Image (cartoon, rainbow, N blue to C red):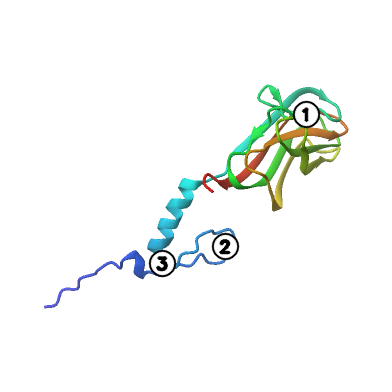
Amino acid sequence: MKTLVYISPHGLTVPFSPGNNPDCFITEETVQEAIEQLCIGVQTTATPGFTFGRSGSLPTNTWLLADTVPSNNAGRLIFLYNAAILAIYAVNEINAAFSLGTYQHDGLGSTYTLKHTLTFLASEKTKFDILATPVPVTTGLRMGMKITNNNGKNVAAGLIIRGSLTV
């Protein structure tokens, strides 16, 4: 009588393909190599959310706060490498047509670069914008948000940024 013995294949002998997912960063061709690449990726990438807000009636050119500091002063530091904004979201207490600009700056109050504008229609209190093309941001600079057109009230907003913890 013969006994069947099943020997499980080693991960280096099993092929791997990311399939049709364009967001899959795995480039390895075997299961073992793909798992190792994934482990490295999990340890070195991040997708933090940065939040801003401000209470009261907010006229044009009002900067939202990063905690209790105006975001044009301190802002939120970009500590990631090869970072990009993936999404921007905001809520407003009233239905009002206004725009919210996302800026990158040096923290010295001298250089502001508009990265994206989130525009609310008069009928909207919430907005979530997943960017079709991620917007690159620079490591070591800061992010801030301000009302760029019309008025908002009690606005809370945020950014979802993807990047790497290592160069």
> Outermost residue toward the bottom?
1
Q: Which mark is residue 63?
A: 1
Disc 1 crowd, CA 10 A, few/some/many (<14, 14-19, 20+): many
| Figure quadrant of residue 76 | top right
Please name the residue that numbered disc 2 is placed on: 21
Side of 82 relative to 127 (left or right): left
Q: Amino acid at mark 3?
A: Thr
* Residue in front for this viewpoint, 108 or 44: 108
The residue under the point 50% across, 60% down is 26
Neighbour tally class for label 2: few under 14, some 14-19, many 20 plus, Cα within 10 Å? few
Distance CA(mark 3)–CA(mark 2): 17 Å
Q: Earlier in the sequence, mark 1 or mark 2?
A: 2
Q: Which is nearer the N-term, disc 3 or disc 2?
A: 2
Residue 30 tag number: 3
Judged from the image, the secondary structure of the residue bearing numbered disc 3 is loop
Cα–Cα span, label 3 and label 1: 50 Å
Mark in the foreground, 1 or 2: 1
Q: Which mark is residue 6?
A: none
103 left or right, relative to 42 = right
Q: Secondary structure at mark 2?
A: loop
Q: What distance separates the C-alpha of mark 1 from that of mark 2?
A: 38 Å
**Which residue type carries mark 1?**
Trp
Of the pair 89 and 85, the residue shown nearer to us: 85
The local secondary structure at tag 1 comes to loop
Q: Does residue 13 appear to the left or right of 57 in the view shown?
A: left
Give the image quarter of residue 2. bottom left
Q: Quadrant of residue 88?
A: top right
- Of mark 3 and mark 1, the one earlier in the sequence is 3
